[in-house]
Image: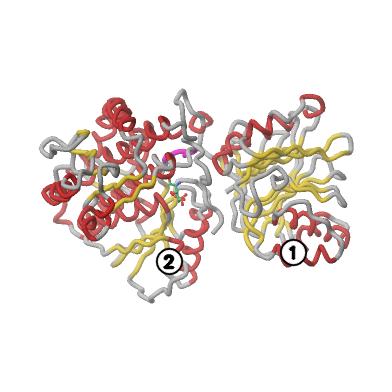
Amino acid sequence: MCGIIAYAGHRPAVPVLIQGLKSLEYRGYDSSGLAFVHMNKLHLFRASGKLEALESKLDSGHILHATSGIGHTRWATHGLPNETNAHPHLDVTANLALVHNGIIENFQEIKDSLSNQGVCFCSETDTEVLVCLISHGLQKKKDIKKAISWTLDQIEGSYAFALISRDHPGTIWAARQASPLLFGVGTGENFIASDIPAFLPFTKEVVFLEDNELIEMNAGQWSVFNSSTLEPVNKEVKTVSWDVQAAKKGGYKHFMLKEIFEQPKVIKDCLSGRINREEQKIILPELQNIAVPKRLHIVACGTSYHAGLWGKYVMESMAGIPVDVEIASEFRYKTLVPDKSKMFLFISQSGETADTLAALRLVKEKGFPVLGLCNVVGSSLARESHTVIYTQAGPEISVASTKAMCSQLVLILLLTLYWTGKNNPEEKNSISEAIKSFSSLPDVLEKELPEMQRRIMGISRDYSWAKSFFFLGRGIYYPMALEGALKLKEISYIHAEGYAAGELKHGPIALIDEEFPTFAIAPSDHLLGKIKSNLKEIQARKGKIIALTQAGSELNVDDELQIPQTWGPLNSFFILPALQLFAYETSVYLGKDVDQPRNLAKSVTVE
Ligand code: M6R
């Protein structure tokens, strides 16, 4: 939630900050701002709305002179998304400017106390309280690092922030607690950001900051300290393999479309080095010292939760491992039943989702083994899991998650096959078949996608009048139905609900009429007969139906899209992009903001 970029170097800082903010806009985009010091004065620019609004406020005169500064793109938590609440926030007494992600939970108490001491606030934000508290600390401690440390001792909640001072031009301080923050090491220039793409065009050398760490940097130097004791902390510089092109649109109209079309490559990348074709084996070295779990507990949010639910079906049917799947925001407040046979699997694209991380910490505290499935290298989830498996999908920029889910499904299936090999050696043939089909999947999918998009574009236009949609599936396709509904509502703002098709007659069917269409997932598997009956019930109530079918599962419905047939669970890799493309094309046709849908942000780092 929200994006931070800070720069100190030899280039004009404002263009670097704007470029960084553009790549972070997916994290929040209801207002933005930047601040820098020039001619012994703090300069502040802020605007509500998209980044263009900020750009249009920047007069080209003196903005090119500053070579350091801080920038922010906001997803509102405290106060309306207007200019007054946009970051950076200033403390005019001490001439400080600060950008902040996260939530200061005790901000009201601190605000009241500072107000009683004569401090006036301009905004409704917790961020302004933070910068004013640092200023207050500075009056006592006469040193910025000490003032920050004093402040952090008093605040509760999550934060990542970057701070500049008029009296120390060129120096930037930053700290984090339960909100991501990275340091980018350049040559004669340094960066702080909430996500790697913000400085990727300039450096791939990264320091992952931990909770309770404070960094002080300028163009040529940087040091990390424990934020309570101010003792120096040694940090390792790591090189990330992401490339700049991967974080750009690459000729596609939207990141979402690019990411949907990247899925064949994502499958290839996920499989790379993980399949031994000669020995017909799955290679997951991360798991070599881990026993096959007796029971698996999957915890995640949103799309990652749907991937987990899909995993339950494959894991139970193939590996014979009982699986529970839970939404992290619910799980974290439940009583954890002691059962030492359980292993926990946390799934997250970003690795920074607050609820998922809170659940992970809870489980670790209770002594359960924790496996993380995550896309972002070095993210909190990756660092805090006992064992992490990376999905290797590359940066996912669009708020609507697409290729990340594809990569999660691949890894869940590999995990299933790996444990199947250990649990049920008699399943050798299905493992061989899976490996064979997996290998040909990327090419088949790549050929299929353009025609799939063309067909879906037409169908989606014909249904763009709909105010509501049902998405139905059975078995392994029930989680897919949930995902199809989530994608549609998230980016087209059409109300959609995913249901296990058999549940329809237990209530939801009351809604069906000619104006309430259904999107059915009806491949030719053992449940086809069942779903056919469900669809007949809908037609009897004049409901219109779009169906994803396969050769042999043709249905007499309003619109049908046939997908290729492959081995068992791999059919999902054709169904998933069809659902994603349906949401995408509907959103484009309705003129919605595909990559940055209203009220959302890419990683949900607040509860
Ligand atoms: O980064 P995570 O996988 O932990 O994110 C979980 C959800 O916030 C995420 O999947 C969200 O539901 C997406 N916007 C769905 O497209």
- In the picture, residue 367 is in which quadrant? bottom left
Q: Relative to 494, say whether 212 is above or below.
A: below
Is residue 394 part of the magenta span, yes or no?
yes
Is residue 591 part of the magenta span, yes or no?
no
- Give the image location of residue 129, x and y in percent: 75, 57
Mark 2 surroundings within 10 Å by alpha-carbon count, few (fewer than 14), some (14 through 19), many (20 or more) = some
Q: Nearer the viewer, residue 55 or 172?
A: 55
Q: Nearer the viewer, residue 86 or 34?
A: 86
Which residue range is magenta in the image? 393-397
Q: How many marks?
A: 2
Q: Nearer the viewer, residue 318 or 187?
A: 318
Query: SS of the residue at dot 1?
Result: loop
Amino acid under disc 1: Thr
What colouring does the structure picture have? Answer: secondary structure
Q: Residue at x 64, y 46 (%)?
A: 81
Classify the position of the C terminus by image quarter: bottom right
Q: Is residue 214 visible?
A: yes
Name the residue beneath numbered marker 2.
331
> Which dot marks residue 229?
1
